[in-house]
């Protein structure tokens, strides 16, 4: 079932005129204008949701979760932005890194899996 849904999504994206672009940390931090700032915020929110879904699906399929959010936590876009910025400070040259990589690394540090994931 999951394979079919994934294949259908890929086929749809290939057949449609959907374009996706990776947002690099430098572009996220210094948007060209207010419209780009809003698009970056929407992109981060989608990225946050996508990483959470990926994490849940991986765990349900027997893989070790990448991070473990507290069970009753509502994880907001503002919190994701804060984690992203904090993690980037510890990266030697974050400017050219996709924000998804930086965010995932930050989520792993902010919400490590321990006793709560068992």
Image: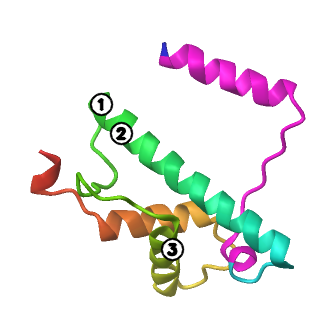
Q: Position of residue 30 (x, y in %)?
A: 75, 83
The residue that label 2 is drawn on is 56
Image location of residue 88, percent across then percent down: 52, 80
User: In the image, is 99 to the left or to the right of 57?
Assistant: right
Location of residue 100 by image quarter: bottom right
Could you give the CA–CA distance between mark 2 and mark 1, rounded to whole angstroms?
6 Å
Mark 2, Cα crowd under 10 Å, few <14 / some 14-19 / many 20+, is: some
* Residue under label 1: 60
- Taken as a whole, is the magenta stretch helix, strand or loop? helix
Up-down relation of residue 56 to residue 90 (above or below)? above
Query: Is residue 26 inside the magenta stretch?
Result: yes
For the residues labelled 1 and 3, the Cα–Cα distance comes to: 26 Å
Query: Reading the chain from its start, which is encountered first: label 1 or label 3?
Result: 1
Residues at marks 3 and 2, CA–CA distance in whole angstroms = 20 Å
In which quadrant of the rendered view does residue 113 lie?
Answer: bottom left
Magenta region: which residues? 2-28
- Residue occupying the point 84% across, 38% down: 18
The secondary element bearing badge 3 is classed as helix
10 Å crowding of disc 1: few (<14), some (14-19), many (20+): few
Query: How many numbered discs?
Result: 3
Q: Quadrant of the C terminus?
A: top left
Tell me the tag on residue 84: 3
Q: Of 113 and 80, which appears nearest the observer? A: 80
Contact, CB < 8 Å: mark 2 with mark 1?
Answer: yes
Residue 27, relative to residue 44: is it above or below? below
Residue 52: x percent and y percent? 43, 48
Q: Earlier in the sequence, mark 3 or mark 2?
A: 2
């Amino acid at each position: 079932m999951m394979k079919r849904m994934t294949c259908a999504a890929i086929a749809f994206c290939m057949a449609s005129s959907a374009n996706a672009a990776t947002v690099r940390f430098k572009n996220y931090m210094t948007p060209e204008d207010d419209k780009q700032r809003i698009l970056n915020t929407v992109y981060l929110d989608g990225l946050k949701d996508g990483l959470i879904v990926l994490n849940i699906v991986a765990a349900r399929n027997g893989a070790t979760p990448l991070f473990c959010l507290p069970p009753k936590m509502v994880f907001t876009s503002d919190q994701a932005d804060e984690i992203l910025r904090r993690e980037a400070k510890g990266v030697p040259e974050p400017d050219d890194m996709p924000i998804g990589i930086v965010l995932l690394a930050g989520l792993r540090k902010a919400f490590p899996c321990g006793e709560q994931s068992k």
